[in-house]
Amino acid sequence: MKKVILAMAVAGLYAFNTTSVFATGLVAIPATGFSGSAYTLCNTTGNFGSSTPTQPTTSANNTCATFPTNEATSPVAGYTLIASTTRNAVINGTTIGNVSDRVWRNSAGTSCIFGARFTALNADWDPNTAGTQYFEVNDIARGGFGSASVNAGYFVQATNASPIYRIGRTFTSVQHRAYKYDTAANKLLLGTNYLDLPTANSVNAAYTGEVTGIGPSTAASTTAATQDAVVNSNWIDFTMDVGYVDDDGGSNVVSAMTYVEAACNSSAVSGWVKTGAIRLRQTGQEATTMQEISIDGYAPPGATVP
């Protein structure tokens, strides 16, 4: 009987939140993905960060967006912050940024919200290449959700924060490129064969796209095979554009705070940390190469993170 009551309570929670799919608030991210894609669109301005995006407000550009009082406050009423940790992001022995990893839990101890926000540092991640190579985070992937019903969204807590352009039920981060990044007009155009909503046919790698970086005046082009990401219910992927200095001239030093709402329990959150539960992906949006940084992160109790 207790299991039935708990299931009904959790189901009611998700039914309530999914009513705001096309307005402010967390949105449902089904375990089976969406029609033809593992992804759904959130902020559609700025061509995924190649141009300057318009930040969400309570009246516009706000799909998937939430507006809590501050970053420490839950985006959904009735949740209390129970864990907050800063984790370093390290590649080639260099700390290129950090992740704020947070968990809020409801009073019944049945549902939690897992938050992550990346901040870039002024650091050269590739000392073997001339000049300063700034790591660019184009996606944050978070694992451990199995086939559970989840809601997801974000909060732009600073004027220099990147909004979230899309959210997917997938392990795969898909490269997104503007046609060129030499003029304001070209930055708004989509590269040849690039998709805002990738297909969901066969690709299950950590990231996919053209492996070679391009210069500002080089026309971006790819194939359908690289614009694909299969549904993986254990992972939620957030697409953004964050870097201390960006090749396209932008400078979104921090990401939005990303949220995943999922079932949990009242056990000690200290036991919920999983190796590799958070992945930072650089997907080669301009002249950069494809890279992944894997770090520890909170995940629902009993989660598996391969």
Image (cartoon, grey):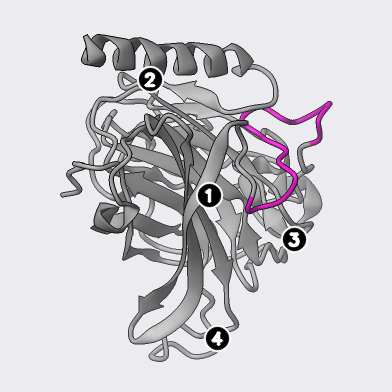
Residue 212: where, in percent of width, then height? 40, 62
Q: Which residue is mark 3?
A: 160
Query: Label 3 sits on what residue type?
Result: Asn
Q: Amino acid at mark 4?
A: Thr
Residue 173 coordinates in the image, percent (x, y):
38, 45
- Marks 3,1: beta carbons within 8 A: no
| SS of the residue under disc 2 | loop
In the image, taking residue 186 as reference, residue 9 lies left or right, namely left
Residue type beneath disc 1 = Leu
- The residue that mark 1 highlights is 81
Pair 2/1: label in front:
1
* Marked residue nearer the N-terminal end (2 or 1): 2
Q: Which residues are magenta?
A: 57-72
Residue that badge 2 annotates: 30
- Name the N-terminal-most of marks 2 and 4: 2
CA gap, disc 4 and disc 3? 21 Å
Name the residue: 41% across, 59% down: 280
